[in-house]
Image (cartoon, grey):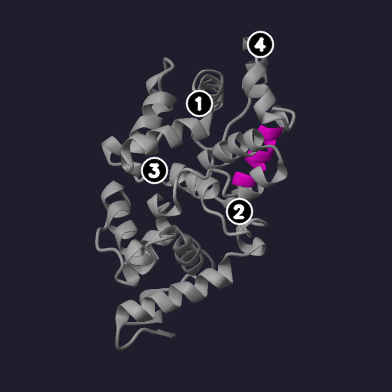
Amino acid sequence: MISITQNPCDSIKQLLDEKYLEYCKSEFFIDTDPIQIPKCFEEKEDIEIAGFLAASLAWGQRPTIIKKCKELMQLMEYAPYDFVMNAEEEDYHRFYNFKHRTFNHYDCIYFLKSLANIYRNHGGLESVFTQAYQKYHDMFEVLKEWHTVFTSLPAAPRVLRHIANVEKGSAAKRVNMFLRWMVRQDGKVDFGLWKNIPPSALLIPLDLHTGNISRQLGLLTRNQNDRKAVEELTARLRELDPVDPIRYDFSLFGLGAFERLKNEDFNL
């Protein structure tokens, strides 16, 4: 049993700090996580594109996610930046049999073409996100800007359900996870490639595990895992660590996914 007594805020911070040190390790967040896909690459643009695609497919069982991500990298001959920059229409035919859950070949090709548009015409993913941050200094506004750019190509309505839209209340879990990978620098898991967005600005990649554990700890009161919950939980985490609040993603996800704690495990 984990006992949280006297000052709950101090005890929760102590718990999360301990769990961060325990879980921010390769055996938890590289060997069994989709982040292993961009870890296969050395060049910045390859890491960005592989990371974005891996994060975009990150729902479902983790072994299946990793398998499908590897399949996608293989279809791009393990040269994602070269493919994005140089692919012609016929090159997209190789993806016609690709499918991950409800994400089918049409969705996949749209994502690849949108990435091609971003790298050919907007300076790349870092440029899109960083310029938006420098303009707004608000990550929800940044996510709105990213959505506008990413959906600027004509799209069938079905593909839009795979593209997080915070204006419609989405938690944007997968995009926020990708941003954590690119912005945070911990020397163990996250890359820290992008230097012009501070870790303090990041939003929590809210999923079932982090949401459930956060409610059990009293960090989150909202029942839905949506934009408002992201706002609430991120604000609480910034109280615990104003400089690097999203490091607690490791703690909360680890408590939920690896330890599967239930309400009776906490003595509040």
Residue 143 visible? The answer is: no
Separation (CA) of disc 4 from disc 3: 32 Å
Residue sitting at x 44%, y 77%: 15
Q: Is residue 66 left or right of residue 138?
A: right
Residue bearing the label numbered 2: 33
Q: Is residue 238 placed above or below 228 in the rendered structure?
A: below
Residue bearing the label numbered 3: 172
The residue mark sitting in front, 2 or 1, is 2
Mark number, residue 90? 4
Residue 246 appears at what percent x and percent y? 44, 58
Badge 4 density bin: few <14, some 14–19, many ≥20, Cα 10 Å: few
The residue mark sitting in front, 3 or 1, is 3
Residue sitting at x 33%, y 42%: 137
Mark number, residue 215? none
- Which residues lie in the magenta part? 65-73
Q: Earlier in the sequence, mark 3 or mark 1?
A: 1
Residue bearing the label numbered 1: 107
